[in-house]
Amino acid sequence: MEIVNSKEYASLPPTQIVPKLADEDKYIASESSFYRVLREQKMLTHRGKAKPGAPRPLSTHIAVKPNEIWTWDITWLHRDVKGLYYKLYMIVDIFSRKIVGFEVWEEENSAHSEVLVRKALLSERICGRPIVLHSDNGAPMKGATFLATLERLGVQSSFSRPRVSNDNPYSEALFKTLKYIPTYPESGFESLKHAREWVKEFVHWYNYVHYHSGINYMTPNDWHNGNGEEIMQKHIKVYNQAKIVHPERWSGQIRDCSLSETVALNPANEDEHSQVLVAHG
């Protein structure tokens, strides 16, 4: 209870507390034990304002490493004046879940989209390398000049199907996380500078601090930069040592430390899935 109620862990669920402790060479208890104690203390509540998400389908776009498939979208950030909004453009890598590009402007247009993509490609040092960029069918995503720029940069465009609401799940989930964290300004952003500074802080937290459930509770930056295996081996060592010290507290295997070898986007059947994997070698 001391750990759960501490400043560092008070806002985190046990699924994030356990691996975070393992990073510090500590093992207190399994997730199930944390949940059991919380339940006994009548403290087992959903931590956050959002409802648990629904499962998402597979896709014909499949990534086997970072910087193969990006997905992007635009969301509106409400201002402190009712009815006015800033526009947040954001790109996320679907394999690592790292935010690789973001910009905040007062309007939506293809010119801003072009700046966003160029900056992301330069930041990741992948100019000229093939990459898929997925989005919905909004005007800023389908402008003729913008699409021509993507083609020159070697970026393959991919779009959600018409009238299908869940073809861009990674961007949708990211925006949901952004707007439901406790620090999100419920009263709105005071200025464009305020919005940009807050988004910059959010991106740093999301990439470098946040333990993401989609990548077995490590930070997107660690997985993006190839540190995942080393981190999981460290966790396995910590859990195995804890099991040796207190074998009576373990009814089975240690926590699952496996990592996904592929990440998929949009619905696909098994034949299509296999064909894409073959194409990846």
Image: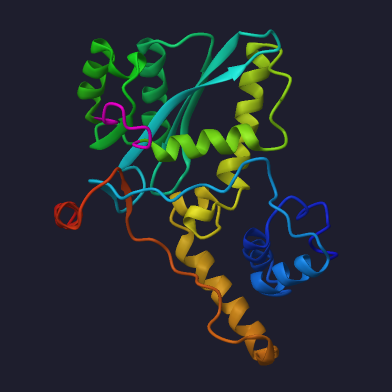
Residue at image position (63%, 12%) is 192
Answer whether residue 131 is visible to the viewer in this image: yes
Say which quarter of the image contains residue 130: top left
Q: Is residue 125 above or below residue 244?
A: above
Residue at image position (65%, 69%) is 31
Please provide percent x and percent y for residue 8.
Answer: 77, 53
Q: Is residue 10 left or right of residue 244?
A: right
Q: Quadrant of the N terminus?
A: bottom right
Residue at image position (40%, 30%) is 72
Please provide percent x and percent y for residue 91.
Answer: 43, 32
How is colour applied across the structure in the image? rainbow
Q: Is residue 210 above or below residue 163?
A: below
Which range of residues does the magenta coloring cover? 158-167
Q: Is residue 194 left or right of residue 67?
A: right
Please provide percent x and percent y for residue 83.
Answer: 61, 8
Residue at image position (34%, 60%) is 261
Say which quarter of the image contains residue 255: bottom right
Please provide percent x and percent y for residue 127.
Answer: 30, 31
Determine the main secondary structure of the stretch shown in magenta: loop
Task: Tell me, yes or no, whether the highlighted magenta stretch contains residue 174.
Answer: no
Say which quarter of the image contains residue 237: bottom right
How many numbered marks have been drawn onto this rendered protein structure? Answer: 0
Q: Is residue 125 above or below residue 192?
A: below
